[in-house]
């Protein structure tokens, strides 16, 4: 433990929910608001695991097996498909 954690308590260990909504906004801009692209990106950003499980065959084509949550870090793999 660092000196500040000793002085001010322990660090909150709850995982932060990442906000990827800006990626869909950028995609809307660069695809001239292609609704299919934007909706898929929003779906992935809102629930990466559900998106990964729904598109497991596409991940498998890229060598990623998404059936085991503990074996995969969704922050690393969610944007591959």
Image (cartoon, rainbow, N blue to C red):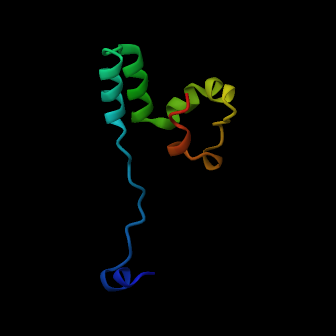
Where does the C terminus fall, quadrant-wise? top right
In the image, 54: left or right of 43? Answer: right
Q: Residue at x 34, y 21 (%)?
A: 30
User: How far across and down, in percent of the image, does residue 66 sit?
Assistant: 63, 36
Q: Which residue is drawn at 35% across and 42% down?
A: 19
Q: Which residue is drawn at 50% across and 44% down?
A: 75
User: How far across and down, in percent of the image, does residue 2 sit?
Assistant: 42, 81
Where does the N terminus fall, quadrant-wise? bottom left
> How many dots with numbers?
0
Q: Which residue lies furthest to the front in this view?
A: 30
Q: In this view, does 56 lie above or below 10?
A: above
In the image, 75: left or right of 43? Answer: right
User: How far across and down, in percent of the image, does residue 49 sit?
Assistant: 52, 37
Q: Which one is nearer the viewer's eye here, 38 or 31?
A: 31
Q: Quadrant of residue 28?
A: top left
Q: In which quarter of the image is residue 61?
A: top right
Q: Which one is nearer the viewer's eye here, 33 or 65?
A: 33
């Amino acid at each position: 433990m660092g000196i500040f954690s000793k002085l001010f308590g322990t660090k909150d260990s709850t995982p932060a929910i990442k906000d990827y909504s800006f990626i869909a906004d950028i995609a809307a801009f660069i695809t001239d608001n292609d609704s299919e692209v934007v909706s898929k990106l929003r779906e992935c950003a809102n629930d990466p695991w559900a998106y990964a499980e729904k598109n497991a065959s596409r991940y498998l084509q890229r060598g990623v097996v998404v059936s085991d949550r503990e074996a995969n870090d969704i922050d690393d793999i969610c944007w591959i498909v």
